[in-house]
Image (spheres, rainbow, N blue to C red):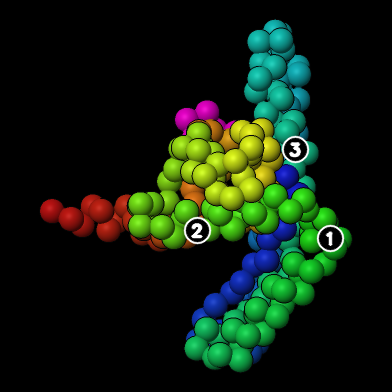
Amino acid sequence: MRVPNSVVLPVGTHVDCCQEQEVAEKTHDIMARITAMLAERKSNLAHFIDNLEGSEEPKFYMDQWERLKEMESCTLTILNLVAVNCTDQHAIRKLEATILKHVRNEELFPEVVRVLPPVYRQVEAAIADIAESEEVADHGMMDLQYLLSKLSQHKNLASLSRELLQDILRYLHRIGLVVWYEEIKHLESTVFLQPTFLITMFKLLVRHQLVQQLESIS
């Protein structure tokens, strides 16, 4: 919801545990809940913005107002839910085909037809080499300036500037090859070369009944 022009493909698993009619009902229910959630979010943002604009001293709340307006402008496209039986390889391949079909849709992803300068590919390949090297920890976290110095050691990248690297990192972040939270002050100087590490960490921390599991530990 905070990423500009996001596209989300909901995937429902455990189809093998449901009857065909139940899958259809659950799919309809999930999509209805998502639609309601987006409508509520839009309404809440509009309400908060109106409150700030109607306050006695609106100039004191300009930072909050700008953040809310930025969130309000973020469009979110929700694709139709795909129900998958994860025990069926054919179903997995069908899901892969569906994802590829959406990714190649120029209306959803204009970047797919963008012609990139050769340096983008060179930096991408060099970052992949650095991420797989033994000197990089499993978490793949690296200081931005240190990453620049490492890239500058590669052939054809000796003159790579920090500004150009940041532009390339924004692109690589958008397509999911790295994670760089440049808008977060405490993280703007850190690049995550291994996005899968973050996924693994979040799966450990953000999960169903986590509080109850922690409370059960003596």
Q: Which residues are magenta?
A: 183-187
Above or below 57: residue 175? below
Does dot 2 land on a helix, a strand or a loop? helix
Tell me where residue 209 appears, x and y as whole percent.
36, 59
- Judged by depth in the image, the label closer to the viewer, 2 or 3, is 2
Three-letter code, disc 2: Asp
Tell me where residue 135 appears, x and y as whole percent.
35, 52
Q: Which residue is mark 3?
A: 72
Q: Is residue 170 visible?
A: no
Farthest top residue? Answer: 57
Above or below 117: residue 112? below
Of the numbered discs 2 and 1, the one sitting upstream in the chain is 1
Q: Which residue is mark 1?
A: 113
Q: Residue at x 52, y 84 (%)?
A: 86
- Judged by depth in the image, the label closer to the viewer, 2 or 1, is 2
Q: Is residue 89 left or right of residue 6?
A: left
In which quarter of the view is residue 102 placed? bottom right
Q: Is residue 202 left or right of residue 20?
A: left
Is 134 covered by the magenta stretch?
Answer: no
Q: Is residue 81 visible?
A: yes
- Spatial separation of the CA atoms under disc 1 and disc 3: 27 Å
